[in-house]
Amino acid sequence: MRRSNTVFTAALLLLGAVLPVSAGADIRDEANREANRLFLATRAACGADYALAIDVTPAPPSGFAPALGETAAPKTGHTLYLVMSGVTSTPAKTMNVGPEWQGRISFVAERARIISISRDGTRGAWTPVAGGEIYAVDIAYRQGWTTKVHELALLANLGRFAKARRPACSDVPAGQHGS
């Protein structure tokens, strides 16, 4: 009997080293906190809305970087400001496998608006954009968190010529609120 207690205790200690700090429903809370942290890394909370800036630089005319010794053309391009309203996150869709956990958390906006500001200050008009899924995180716990972020299709389609950043709320042009 004594040997089986020792084995049982060793098994519990080993299991404790493999499981996250908290298990069960708490792990979903930890996953939601991690997803929110990732969401807010490139988005600013401006009142009840969330803002995202996307700096877009066009490709060089040749399609390649300038040769050594040549100077690059002056920076041109524009910044897109996307303001999302009514943002909620879906509960984690989960799959528990022993001490491992994985799920997907999606962020959905009721409505959104976008505006383009060129580098020379020329300003477009606010344009409504369909709401829907604006961000998703596939998240897993296997001896530590791993994540895969699924960004807006707009950002993915712009590819290497676009860089998302978290704007200051004061940088977002006026008129973004409402619909």
Image: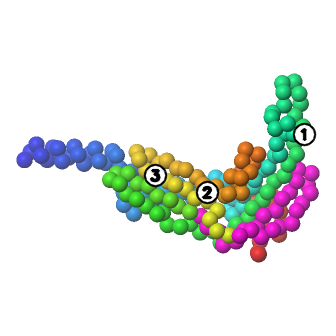
Q: Could you say which is closer to the camera, residue 26 or residue 99?
A: 99
Mark 3 = which residue? 140
Q: Earlier in the sequence, mark 3 or mark 2?
A: 2
Label 3 crowd bin: few (<14), some (14–19), many (20+), radius 10 Å:
many
Q: Which mark lies nearer to you, 2 or 1? A: 1
Label 2 crowd bin: few (<14), some (14–19), many (20+), radius 10 Å:
some
Q: Are marks 3 and 2 in contact (CB under 8 Å)?
A: no
User: Alpha-carbon distance for marks 3 and 1?
Assistant: 43 Å
Residue interval drawn in magenta: 107-130
Q: Residue at x 64, y 62 (%)?
A: 134
Q: Earlier in the sequence, mark 2 or mark 1?
A: 2
Where, quadrant-wise, is the C terminus in this rendering?
bottom right
User: Alpha-carbon distance for marks 2 and 1?
Assistant: 32 Å
Percent x, y for residue 150?
60, 54
Q: Amino acid at mark 3?
A: Ala
Label 1: which secondary element: loop
Q: Amino acid at mark 2?
A: Phe
Q: Is residue 8 magenta?
A: no
Determine which quarter of the picture holds residue 71: top right
Mark 1 = which residue? 74
Q: Is residue 127 magenta?
A: yes
Q: Amino acid at mark 1?
A: Pro
Mark 2 = which residue? 39
User: Alpha-carbon distance for marks 3 and 2?
Assistant: 16 Å
Label 1 crowd bin: few (<14), some (14–19), many (20+), radius 10 Å:
few
